Image (cartoon, rainbow, N blue to C red):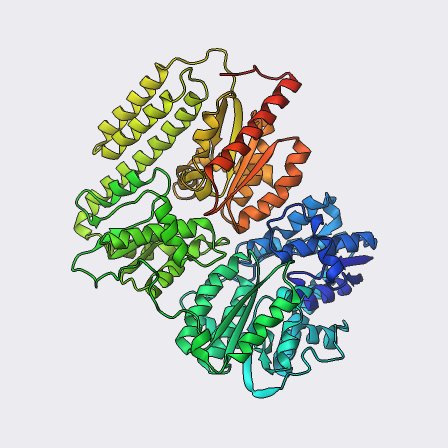
Amino acid sequence: MIVGIPQVLSSFYYLPFYKSFLEGLGCRVLPSSPTTARTLQQLSICPTDEPCISVKLAFPHTRELLDRGVDYLFLPTLVSKDQHSYYCPKHIGLPAMLRSGFDLPAEKLLSPLINWREARRASVASFMEMGRRLGQSENEIRKSLRSAWRFQNRWSALCAGEKLTAPEGFERYLGMSRFKRRRPYNPAARLNRSRRIGVLGHNYVLYDYIAHNIVERLREHAAVLVAEMLPARAIRESLGETAYGRSLWSFEQTIVGSALYWLRRRMVDSLIFLGPFECGPEAVMELLLEKEAEKAGIPLLILTVDEQTGEAGLVTRLEAFLDTLSEQSAVRPGSGKTPAGTRLIPPHQESRVLGFPNMGHLGAALSTILNDGLVRTVGPFPVTRQTVALGEELAPEFICYPFTVTIGQMRQSLEAGANTIIMVGGKGRCRLGWYAELQELALKRAGYRFEMLTIDSPFPLRENYGPFIRTLQSFFEPSLRGRLIRSALLGFYKALLTERAEALFFKLQAREKQRGGAYGLFQKFLKRSAAAASFGSLRKGYRDFADDGAALRLEQRCAPLRVRLIGEIYAVFEEYVNQEIARTLGSLGDIRIEVEREITVMNWFCHNILKSPAQLLRHSRISTAAKPYLEQSVGGHGRDSVGLAALAPREGVEGVIHLWPFTCMPEIVAQSILAGLTEKLSLPLLTVIVNEQTGRAGLKTRLESFAHILQERREAGGGGIECIS
């Protein structure tokens, strides 16, 4: 029995475990060949362009193994390794991406689950089931599993004790030969053993072809330290000294934990951080590492690589960095200077003045909850070009667009007199839970003085209710609890009715004879809703909107095309970010389209917080539809995007638009799966990736082309009634 292991991603960490476990089951293990320049020429096998280079490489590596005739492929689904953290969504979704990209039979890919945080029994059961498929008894499987974990731990300890890199450890203890250059990379290099350089990065970047042997090159100049040279205990202790350490993604814990250990013990003179283009966790680690390196006075060089990175350019930057190490101030990250246009906020006033970012039409609801004499607030401010420009000045390069927009809104609030910012939190699979920490860090480095209050979900109550209440009490007097509850209920009702009104608006704008009337009515409702101070006035505003909508002259024989918006919630919900895509679709000149948008804030709230039976049932149906294509949640709304697309044809939806911000990790996974899924279902799919450069005119052209495709498909199929304005 030959089992192939693609030499990508997690295998650069867990190959000892993978190989030992499979050999214990009587399998012959065949790793794919190391990446070469020829491998990079085959990246087009990846069905989409958006994943980072490390994910793209998995496709030619898998293709090689399939061509070599392996009986099975082995790639576990990595969700979590402990009770506190997750793996990056790409490790959760990669098996599903490969299965979809190659249209593999389910039995061809052995992908046992590793999810010690949420599903320990299911994880063990998945390894047992896999072993039985390979013809082994339960005792043999358990024995092999225990032995493999012991070997993995022993291998890690040996690498730390002998100061080996991962490839050196693979060569010594797994018998896998590694590339060794016989002549020096730089004949003019002079080794200075007293110089110590800490090299940071994912093993699947540092030791793959794309890094151009950066570790070996640096060893010609200095003593080089890498993360696997530290025992796991040391990394855990370093992370334990921070508030965020245990919540980092698993491989990222190794990177940040080793950096903290070196910096706080003065074990390095400089740091080099190498990351792949579009890596989601890198944008988080970048700010954290810059802060720690700056605090320690240690120079930090951040390098980014992808399939286009040339060896000469990378070497030039390395040599320039080495040449300037003696002038540390020239390369020290972050000078503490304030970005242009930033005004330093004065020290806290005696009373709190709250500011908070907005999303979509939520501003009226949030203002209702926080006002009513409960606390002073400024904003929320609508998103504008100025908002984005303010955010761009402080946001890390590869962070997602919502981060940029919300930090821009925070700056507007602070400039308007806020001294406290409220932001949602909660560490999970995607980066949203890290926004508050990173935004506070970026804003304070820019010179702002304020307090950040992070509000996490109160659920599960046993763990989170206490911290949740303490956060609320920090800016609400206990004596105002009754008024707070009333304001919260009214704000909730505003948000709920606004989403209902918007759904009705989508239906009306697709059918009205005189275009624009429904939009005017909806804008009128939004103003009345924002001003409503009672439940009665709010209900009356909604009834009047519905009555006025019913009075519009509609096309009686109109059967609009139905288009579903899916994707990341901020991109789907915030109109400035998506360039008012729903309104644009509903007002195209010659084709009528009814927009459906199920990924909304209130649907999320009713499902995750209120546990509404209707939303629980709907979410179960979505998850069931997604399961054949993406069984595990990858964070955000990634799995929802897949499930809603899978449901679309049987629910009468004729096209799907997938909206997400550039570098969004969960939606990159979803996109790779949607490419094959929509082709199987013959479902038209338009992918719209939004960032600071997205233009309204170009997007409208794409939407018009997509609409005409849908119209032609309907006419060719004879279904529905042609609906021309």
Q: Which residue is found at the position 26% from the left and 62% from the top? A: 344
- Left/right placement of residue 284 relative to residue 527 reads right
Q: Is residue 639 visible?
A: yes
In this view of the protein, which residue sits in the foreground, 95 or 348? 348
Q: Is residue 458 visible?
A: no
In this view of the protein, which residue sits in the foreground, 545 or 380? 380
The image shows residue 592 at horizontal and vertical percentages of 50, 21
The image shows residue 274 at horizontal and vertical percentages of 57, 67
Q: Is residue 587 above or below residue 419?
A: above
The image shows residue 246 at horizontal and vertical percentages of 47, 65
**If the image is split into quadrants, where does the N terminus sit?**
bottom right
Q: Which residue is found at the position 44% from the left and 56% from the top? A: 427
Number of marks present in the image shown: 0
In this view of the protein, which residue sits in the foreground, 113 or 42? 42
Q: Is residue 3 above or below residue 591?
A: below
Q: Is residue 99 above or below residue 152?
A: above
The image shows residue 218 at horizontal and vertical percentages of 62, 78
Q: Which residue is found at the position 21% from the left and 32% from the top? A: 534
